[in-house]
Amino acid sequence: MNQSIHFKPNREIMRLLLTTVIICLSTIQTNAQWIESSSCDELSGTIANKGITHLVNLEPMSAVAMANAALIADESCALANIVLADAAIERDKMTYLSQIGSLSLSAEEKAYLNIILATNEERPSVAAEEFKKQSSNPLLHYKYAGSNGDWESMLDGASKYVGSEQS
């Protein structure tokens, strides 16, 4: 009498779990950086990273404001344009990405950009590939777990990165 129990996750439980993880991620201290190495100067890089925090917290208008502020501080900040593209609707993404042009991107920025440029169908595999290359990056971990529906990895990332920065 070997009975196996199959667990089917309830959508409401998964939604609650995702909300909890997002709240945990939002508590990352103010000096935490999603993208450590960027093409931006220090001030605009910090501002653009705060824009990413707003995106993770489902606050796209605040993310756009932070990205625009980063561009005021450093108009060659590619990360700010990537944040704007990530917050934009599909038809407007290329408008922001065309601003990047020939700027040199860090490896983290390139990985983030590759995930954004992927179609909805390609995004899970692209995110997994980029995360595999840079598994210590919290943003790539978040993008991987979110696009692949890997809730265990999402929780692992939250426990690994939340509160890991010292003030």
Image: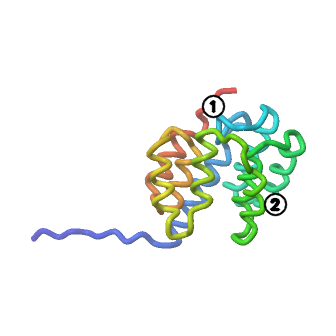
Q: Nearer the viewer, residue 20 or 130?
A: 130
Instruction: Please name the amino acid that badge 1 sits on.
Output: Glu
* Label 1–label 2 contact, CB within 8 A: no
Quarter where residue 150 is shown: bottom left
The image shows residue 84 at horizontal and vertical percentages of 76, 56
Q: Nearer the viewer, residue 51 or 15?
A: 51
Residue at the outermost front position: 102
**Residue drawn at 71 percent across, 52 percent down:** 82
Badge count: 2
Residue at the outermost right position: 72
Asked if residue 32 is positioned above or below residue 71 in the image, the reply reads: above
Crowd class of label 2 (few under 14; some 14 to 19; many from 20; radius 10 Å)? some
Quarter where residue 90 is shown: bottom right
Label 1 to label 2, Cα distance in Å? 26 Å
Return the residue at label 2. Answer: 61
The image shows residue 111 at horizontal and vertical percentages of 57, 48
> In the image, is 28 to the left or to the right of 6?
right
**Residue drawn at 57 percent across, 56 percent down:** 115
The earlier-in-sequence mark between 1 and 2 is 2
Callout 2 secondary element = helix
The image shows residue 27 at horizontal and vertical percentages of 67, 44
Q: Quadrant of the N terminus?
A: bottom left
The image shows residue 164 at horizontal and vertical percentages of 59, 33
Instruction: Please name the amino acid that badge 2 sits on.
Output: Met
Return the residue at label 1. Answer: 165
**Residue drawn at 45 percent across, 60 percent down:** 125
Q: Nearer the viewer, residue 112 or 105?
A: 105
